[in-house]
Amino acid sequence: MLKKINSTSDMTVGDPWKCILSFTLPMLIGNIAQQLYNTVDSIVVGKYIGDNALAAVGSAAPILNLLLVLFIGISAGAGVMVAQYFGAKNREALSSTIGNSITVTAIASIGLIVIALPFITPLLDVLNTPESIAKGCADYLIISLVGIAGMAYYNILSGILRGMGDSFFPLMALLVATVLNIGLDVLFVAVVGMGVGGVALATVIAQLVSAVLCLIKLARMQTSFDFGPYYLRLQKHYVKTLIRLGLPSGLTQAIFSSAMIIVQSLTNCFGEMFIAANVVVMRVDGFAMMPNFSFGMALTTFSGQNVGAGLYDRVKKGARQGTLMAVGCSAAITVAILFFGKYLMGLFTDTEELIALSNSLMKILAAGYIAFAVTQSLSGVMRGAGDTLTPMWISLITTVAVRVPVAYGISYLTRTELLPYGRQECIQISLLCSWVLGAVLTVIFYAFGKWKKKSLKQ
């Protein structure tokens, strides 16, 4: 049984919902494990250092996410190409795609460190980061950036493995790295006393380990493709296709991360308590989103393999079944948050005021998870088919035209003498509005069927 799970999976045969669910479950556990990286960081700093340190880690997150958009794009493009070439049984194209992805990632990692490192501290100043958390935030970002190759390669290599239907081994690599991360967090912060920089260093080391494990696994999977120096040479066709497919996904994340940074500037105006509460909410939110992201990625692989094989009716059937499963899972999570949210918030801090504030903000977001399930599932189908532009435009509309204006609009309209920056709930309300609109637009564009004409030609 273990041998069967720990292998590539052909999703062009069998019941669609069974293929999607069996692929989603290990990936969901893996995504939860990955989310534990940041969550454990937050719990450790909140319990051992204090609420200001918790706020520092949270303020660093939007900037770190922006730095990662390049690798998210590479990973998305590689995942689509691998899934379609694997489904089409095109060994040469599959081999070249994998090799070129690895080389492009190396070049991008070095370039990002050189370009971004000098701008970390000036950017924190521009964002009105409170002086009490600025140093911790800078330390966290600098260490994370220097060690970004581990994070980048895990995302790219795990995406390649999933494209070939193996969602099990990335899970194993993440579980190993998560245990290591937790141990190093406690060691560096509680024992050595390294502060916020210690949790960043722990995460960097753990992610590097997960990347190395995935590379070793990939090197041993040569029944489906060839792996060697020849395929690491950059080839114009594959690099262009990688950029064409990955750029929209990277831009989507860049838009989202840029909006988070803009909103973070508004968040910082509400003070350290609200910043810390927002961190707690986002950590719980990260776990609540995991089923949505997992079903979305599973449907990307399912769609990619079946589009590569020309099975469009099967793609549509899988899209319906996968979306229904994602919606049902999100509905259960929403109910759990509404009833047990307070206890979840208590994991991060012992400050009653912070727990109450975090819980009230979380309840605003709860209903949005069902809408986001629809968006992620159908967007996954479109991306897998090769239509990565449509999800990008939807993200652009909901983020730039809705989230940022709504957040600042509510803030401005609710200003009073006692609330000089307006109601702090504007942050969560704006996010909820963007999720709901995103679901509506995604359903409409999926129904138009443009994604059916985007398969790769080789």
Image (cartoon, rainbow, N blue to C red):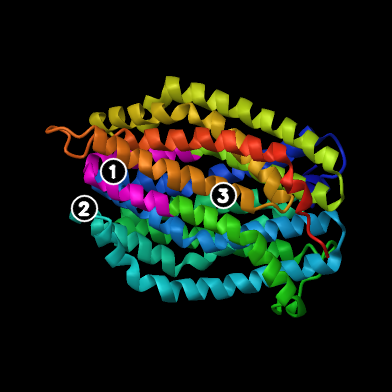
Mark 1 or mark 3, which is nearer to you? 3
Quarter of the image containing the C terminus? bottom right
Q: Amino acid at mark 3?
A: Trp
Residue 191 colored magenta? no
Compared to residue 120, the image places residue 321 above or below, namely above
> Disc 3 versus disc 2: distance between alpha carbons?
34 Å
Residue 353 at least partly seen: yes
Residue 208 at least partly seen: no
Q: Which span is picked out in magenta?
A: 258-286
Quarter of the image containing the N terminus? top right
> Disc 2 versus disc 1: distance between alpha carbons?
10 Å
Q: Amino acid at mark 1?
A: Ile
Tell me which residue sits at (87%, 42%) in the image.
13
Q: In the drawing, what numbered circle is on residue 275?
A: 1
Q: In the drawing, what numbered circle is on residue 393?
A: 3
Give x and y (percent) for residue 114.
43, 76
Q: Is residue 50 left or right of residue 175?
A: left
Q: In the drawing, what numbered circle is on residue 401?
A: none
Give x and y (percent) for residue 430.
39, 37
In the image, 374 versus 114, the foreground residue is 374
Tell me which residue sits at (33%, 32%) in the image.
358
Q: Quadrant of residue 299?
A: top right
Contact between labelled residues 1 and 2, with CB atoms less than 8 Å apart: yes
